[in-house]
Image (cartoon, rainbow, N blue to C red):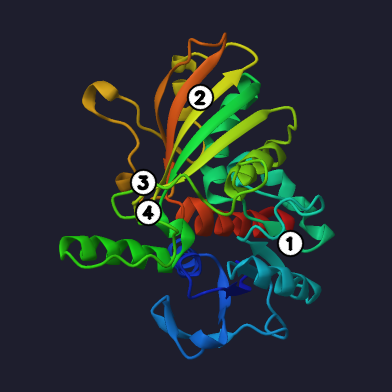
Amino acid sequence: MKQYNVAVAGATGAVGNEMVKVLEERNFPVKNLTLLASSRSVGKTMSFHGKDVKVEELKEDSFKGIDIGLFSPGGSVSLKFAPIAAASGCVVIDNTSAFRMAPDIPLVVPEVNEHAIAEHKKRGIISNPNCSTIQMVVALKPLHDVAKIKRVVVSTYQAVSGTGQKAIRELENQVLAIYNMKPIEKKVYPHQIAFNILPHIDSFLESGYTKEEMKMVNETKKILEDDNIAVTATTVRVPVFYGHSESVNVEFESEMTPDMAREILARAPGIKLVDDPSKNLYPLALEAAGKDDTYVGRIRLDDTVKYGLNMWVVADNIRKGAALNAVQIAESLIAKYL
């Protein structure tokens, strides 16, 4: 099997760490692994297949000889370095929001629109969608193929790891402070996150929606390749470390019963159906954490519309919502498009 020189940009962050783990777990054919981060991380080491790999500083000449670059260094860094990497012949798979809505850059979830990877030749960049969008479209696409979706109303309950390692530490520290009756420090979020819920992810727009909510709206339409689907979202941060949960209400143009949906989703790629409320079986963030599948359950009729369903969708936001999806794109890329 052909092997590839792979670089991970933003390697020391929560997603970058997971990208390295996923590359190893899935035995991606890596010839040489280059770990890139800011100057602050230079000299750190990360383990890959039992060997220590030193972290190097991300520079303009970091991509000579690199075949595939997995990027999660932050949007502004990707905006600068992804085109430089692509110009050197590296195919960039970017996890930031920098290029998601660019018309000439594919936005890909392999279970949903793998064919779009072919468009990478336009600019040498493939965009990884927002974590909350990924798990939702994995659940929506098989249903959309059978009974066209008319409208989606989604409320998300998103883990702090979506903000990064600093947010994980903030939740840990706040919980410890509360139990030890010490003052709480708020640095990452505008309010206490421990034992609290914040209806605020990313910055607010003039419309009253947040950027995160509009990412879900716009990315869903782009990935499903249907601008006629109406999507509205409310995104909420909850005091959970790993695993985003979503309440998804779907209106269809033709009949889609709960039994039909269960049958379709049970055989759909990347989905684990967990739907037996009589035995208290439904998707849980705790059980999805560290797993690759998107968990779907609580499927029931919405009898306020002619053809409607409600469901509960859960996935690990760092794995399927970020690192795993990026590596799956890379797997499809080398199998069919390079």
What residue type is disc 3 on?
Ala
What's the CA distance linking mark 1 and mark 4? 28 Å
Q: Mark 4 points at which residue?
A: 242
Q: Name the residue under label 3.
A: 288
> What is the number of callouts on the image?
4
Q: Which amino acid type is marked by label 4?
A: Tyr
Q: Is residue 178 left or right of residue 238?
A: left
Residue at the bottom extreme, as displayed: 43
Q: Name the residue under label 2.
A: 264
Real-space Cα distance between discs 4 and 2?
A: 27 Å
Residue 207 vertical position relative to residue 175 in the rendered view, above or below: above
Q: Nearer the viewer, mark 2 or mark 3?
A: 3
Mark 3: give few (<14), some (14-19) or many (20+) Cα within 10 Å: many
Identify the mark nearer the N-term, 1 or 4: 1
Which residue is drawn at the image coordinates 48% and 71% (left, top)? 13
Q: Which residue, given by chain and number where applicable, does mark 1 sit on?
A: 125
Q: Which of marks 4 and 2 is nearer the N terminus?
A: 4
Nearest-to-viewer mark from 4 and 3 = 4
* N-term mark: 2 or 3: 2
Residue that appears at 56% across and 36% down: 233
